[in-house]
Image (cartoon, grey):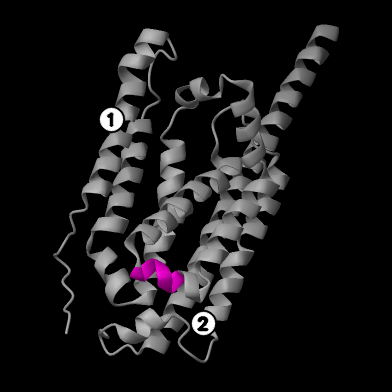
């Protein structure tokens, strides 16, 4: 019977190579290329730390003991892994990447139009929700656990569509503008629905939907069905909580902006009054 260890990390050359490549391209962009082409005088404070925190979170999700726990033992652990890849990694990568570093990629008008299209709220919602829901369809989900390359593709699609999904509320590039604050809040509300729906279907199922977890060794006395129910609750509750928390941040930003605008208008009025006197 297989045994789980909290101290065993997994060496995957493809993962390490990919992460090192991303780290190297970022360093090249914020360093030598920035100075050579005059993209910016300096790198925003903390940006690099956030970007590399995103890479570190990605490595933890797919190479730490969590990865083995997810693939070989517990469906619920797999849901935690997926939340890391979709709710933690992409926001860190976005806020850690200065807009001017991405601007050269949009020099061609066709690329800019395509990027603006896919990062519009409706398209971003459809892309992310479709990918998220499709990969949790039991036959396809089980296939990813039995075929490594398919599993890699699943994770790449999760991360890439999540980056697109988070862009309308976190993007920092004027060429790809964010919608108004009310639209952002509506967008985030609708994003909370697919994880809630899929999570509810999984939680309230009376049978084990994913045959892979009915075959693997059990840990800590958790049956496959109870493990599945916990995983569904993680998806439903934590997934929704992330989007609701993001709605709160958007609302506070909206409130702060309205307050600043009101204050500015007030100062303008005082100045006009003073001129008349």
Q: Is residue 80 left or right of residue 17?
A: right
Q: Residue at x 38, y 76 (%)?
A: 75
Q: Residue at x 38, y 32 (%)?
A: 47
Q: Is residue 224 above or below residue 190?
A: below
Give the SS element for disc 2.
helix
Can residue 177 be seen here? The reply is no
Q: Is residue 23 left or right of residue 124?
A: left
Q: Position of residue 213 (x, y in %)?
A: 36, 81
Image quadrant of residue 256?
A: top right
Q: Residue at x 65, y 54 (%)?
A: 126
| Circle 1 residue | 24
Q: Which residues are magenta?
A: 141-146
Q: Is residue 139 left or right of residue 125?
A: left
Q: Residue at x 55, y 44 (%)?
A: 164
Q: Position of residue 114 (x, y in %)?
A: 63, 33
Give the SS element for disc 1.
helix
Tell me the distance, in whole angstroms, between the alpha carbons under discs 2 and 1.
42 Å
Q: Position of residue 160 (x, y in %)?
A: 48, 47
Inspect the magenta stretch and tell me whether residue 122 lies in it: no
| Circle 2 residue | 203
Dot placed on the residue nearer the N-terminal end, 2 or 1: 1
Main SS, magenta region, reads helix
Q: Position of residue 171 (x, y in %)?
A: 55, 36
């Amino acid at each position: 019977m297989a045994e789980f260890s909290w101290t065993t990390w997994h060496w995957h050359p493809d993962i390490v190579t990919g992460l090192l490549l991303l780290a190297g391209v970022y360093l090249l962009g914020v360093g030598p290329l920035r100075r050579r082409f005059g993209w910016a005088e300096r790198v925003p404070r903390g940006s690099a730390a956030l970007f590399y925190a995103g890479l570190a979170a990605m490595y933890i999700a797919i190479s730490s003991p969590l990865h083995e726990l997810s693939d070989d033992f517990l469906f619920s652990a797999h849901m935690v892994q997926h939340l890391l890849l979709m709710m933690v990694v992409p926001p860190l990568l976005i806020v850690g990447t200065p807009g001017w570093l991405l601007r050269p990629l949009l020099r061609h008008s066709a690329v800019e139009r395509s990027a603006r299209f896919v990062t519009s709220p409706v398209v971003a919602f459809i892309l992310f929700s479709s990918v998220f829901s499709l990969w949790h369809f039991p036959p396809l989900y089980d296939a990813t656990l039995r075929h490594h390359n398919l599993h890699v593709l699943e994770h790449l699609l999760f991360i890439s569509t999540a980056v697109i999904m988070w862009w309308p509320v976190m993007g920092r590039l004027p060429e790809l503008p964010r919608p108004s604050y009310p639209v952002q809040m509506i967008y985030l509300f609708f994003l909370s629905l697919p994880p809630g729906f899929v999570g509810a279907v999984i939680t309230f199922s009376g049978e084990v939907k994913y045959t892979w977890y009915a075959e693997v060794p059990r840990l800590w006395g958790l049956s496959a069905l109870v493990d599945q129910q916990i995983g569904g609750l993680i998806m439903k509750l934590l997934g929704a909580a992330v989007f609701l928390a993001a709605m709160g941040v958007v609302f506070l930003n909206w409130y702060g902006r309205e307050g600043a605008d009101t204050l500015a208008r007030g100062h303008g009025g005082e100045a006009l009054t003073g001129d008349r006197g």
